[in-house]
Image (cartoon, coloured by chain):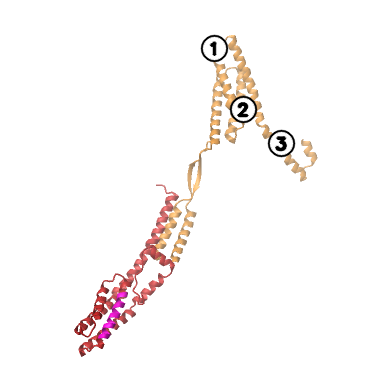
Amino acid sequence: MKMTQKTAFILAALLVLGSAWGKARLTFSSMQKQLDVVYTEGVDHDGQSIAQDIQAKQNTARNCVTVARRYDSAINASLITAVENAAENLDQADSMGERRRLETKLDTAFASLSSALLEASLSQKDEAYVIGFMSEYLASQDRIERDPYHEKAAAVLKDTAGWFPSLLQKLTASSLDIYQIGG
Amino acid sequence: MTGKTEIIRKPSPWPILIAALAWAIVCLILPMIQLWHYLAALAAGGIAYGIARHQIPDQEIEVEIPLTPLQQQQLQQLEAARSALTGLQQAAAKVEDPAMTQDLRKIESVCRQIVEEMEKQQRFNDQARRLVDYYLPMLTKLLETYDELEADPLQTQNIQNSRQNIKKTVKLCAEAFVKQWDDLHEHQSMEIQADSDVLETLLVKQGLVSPGQKEDKA
């Protein structure tokens, strides 16, 4: 088949658009995958990750609920339910934004429940538990805030900032799903 | 006139594909999420196109050029003229009379030159065209008649008179054709004269020849 100018233009256009679109999409997808790996497995793939710390917060909150149930009469039931629901819903979050929102909700609910427990007349042993839960919870939060994920995420956000990368994200239907402390 | 095809040069399509390939290679190397990545790919494509355009020769394509109505008409006229000339040559070959043969040779020579000029110049003088389109077929017809009369075994008075008339007509035609040929060159002769006069005047004005020399020539 003899190649004509028109055929060449069509092939060239397909090659140019296809390669650019494909590579941009692949790049965004790769960035997202790398961040997701750091989020779930940690920067050294040792499990020391934000996901693990959030899981730890959920466990601590559930343990705190167990203690609170022993003092039904002194603790408002809604505080317990709020912690339970927030911990439960957090497992079902399907995006980083949603996860972050539910995590904040859990933080607030846990803070309210633990304050109520400390104000109530607990047994000495339970009081020690509650203080321990609060310390664990704060430690988890601290680890989340110091996680190397945030540096990686900041680098990705820097690389994808501006109108052009934003436009490309729209064109390639690849919006980045990033866990942000302030977000 | 008969050159109905023309070789046209078209740029090869390969430089376009090579440029696109260079773009795609840059796409493989760079992440393609920043504007400068695209500008780099564009530059690579442009350079590849420039090099390929320089290295790959243009395509030479033979295309058929449609004739204009005027050209078609001229082509038909030329073919008719050639056909009329062939007809005359065939008819003249059968004539045995020496004087008539000589006249026919003159006519044939003039007509052949007119046809050649028509082919060469792509220009059709009305008078010349009339000569080959109208008079020549008539003359050919007369010659055919002459040939038939000559072949008649009885050769009656009327037949002989008719043959004499045709002979006279052929002689007249020969003179007319030669005159026509001369007339056709009158315009050319006038142009040559005008060009010569201008050149001589310029030479005199620039002092390269004296006015006397010009007059002597005249």
- Quadrant placement of the N terminus of chain B: top right
Residues drawn in magenta: A101-116
Residue B193: assigned label:
3
* Whole-percent x, y for residue B16 in the image: 45, 54
Residue bearing the label numbered 2? B110
Determine whether the residue tagged by mark 2 lies in a helix, strand or loop: helix
Chain A pictured colour = red
Query: How many numbered tags mark residues here?
Result: 3
Determine whether the residue tagged by mark 3 lies in a helix, strand or loop: helix
Residue B152: assigned label:
1
Mark 3–mark 1 Cα distance, whole angstroms, equals 54 Å
Q: Tell me which amino acid carries mark 1.
A: Asp
Residue A112 belongs to magenta span? yes
* Whole-percent x, y for residue B104 in the image: 60, 22
* Residue beneath the point at 63% across and 25% down: B177
Q: Residues within 10 Å of mark 2 (few under 14, many from 20)?
A: many
State left or right for residue B20 relative to residue A112: right
Mark 2–mark 3 Cα distance, whole angstroms, equals 24 Å
The residue closer to the viewer here, B165 or A120, is: A120
Mark 3 / mark 1, whichever is N-terminal: 1
Q: Tell me which amino acid carries mark 3.
A: Gln
* Residue beneath the point at 25% across and 80% down: A79
Q: Chain of mark 1?
A: B
* Whole-percent x, y for residue A100 in the image: 32, 75
Mark 2 / mark 3, whichever is N-terminal: 2
* Whole-percent x, y for residue A96 in the image: 32, 72
Q: Chain of mark 3?
A: B
The quarter of the picture where residue B185 lies is top right
